[in-house]
Image (tube, grey):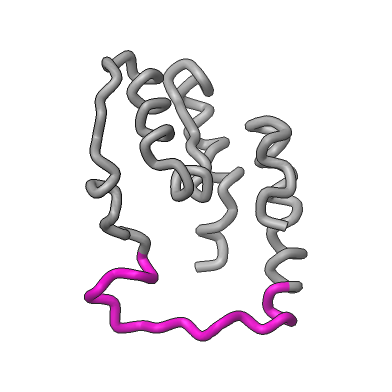
Amino acid sequence: MIHRGCYSEQIKYWMEHFSLGESLKIIHYEAFEKTKSAALQEILEFVGAPPHRIKEKAFETDYSPNKRESATLIYPPLTNETKAYLKRFYKPYNDELANLLGEYWRGVWD
C-alpha cells in the first residue's frame, strides 16, 4: 500500500504513452482542494472545453477515501517516527516527481 504514494513511478508509465502538457495533465491534489473552481477551469481549458461556471456548493462533497461517510476505518494520527520514516522513504520519489513535472512540485510534501 505504501507504493501508492510513489507518484513518479505511476506518472513515468503514463508519460511513455502520452505527452505531458499536450495530452496528459497532472493536477496537484492539495492545490485542487484549495481552489476547486480554478482547477476545474484549468482542466476545461486543457481539454479544449469552454469555461463553465459551477457553484461552489457543488464542490462541497468530499470524495477522499478517508472521509467517506461509509468508511469503517478510522486512521489514528501518524507518530513522529512514522512521519520521519515516510519522509525518508518518499524523498527520492518526490525528487524524481519534481524532475519530471517541474520545480513547483519540489518539496510539496515536506
Closer to the camera, 17 or 66? 66
Residue visible at 67% across and 49% down in the picture: 108
Residue visible at 36% across and 61% down in the picture: 64
- Counting from the top left corner in percent of width and height, residue 100 is at 66, 32
Residue visible at 45% across and 42% down in the picture: 35
Where does the C terminus fall, quadrant-wise? bottom right
Q: Is residue 100 left or right of residue 30?
A: right
- In the image, residue 65 above or below residue 40: below
- Counting from the top left corner in percent of width and height, residue 104 is at 68, 35
- In the image, residue 66 above or below residue 90: below
Q: Mostly what secondary structure, the magenta segment?
A: loop
Q: Is residue 30 left or right of residue 41?
A: right
- Counting from the top left corner in percent of width and height, residue 51 is at 29, 20
Closer to the camera, 33 or 79? 33
- In the image, residue 44 above or below residue 61: above
Closer to the camera, 108 or 24? 108
- Counting from the top left corner in percent of width and height, residue 4 is at 51, 58
- In the image, residue 47 above or below residue 37: above
Closer to the camera, 103 or 1? 103
Residue 101 sits inside the magenta stretch: no
Q: Is residue 96 left or right of residue 3?
A: right
**What are the residue bounds of the magenta stretch?**
65-83
Residue 82 sits inside the magenta stretch: yes
Q: Is residue 58 left or right of residue 64?
A: left
Mark count: 0
Residue visible at 25% across and 25% down in the picture: 52
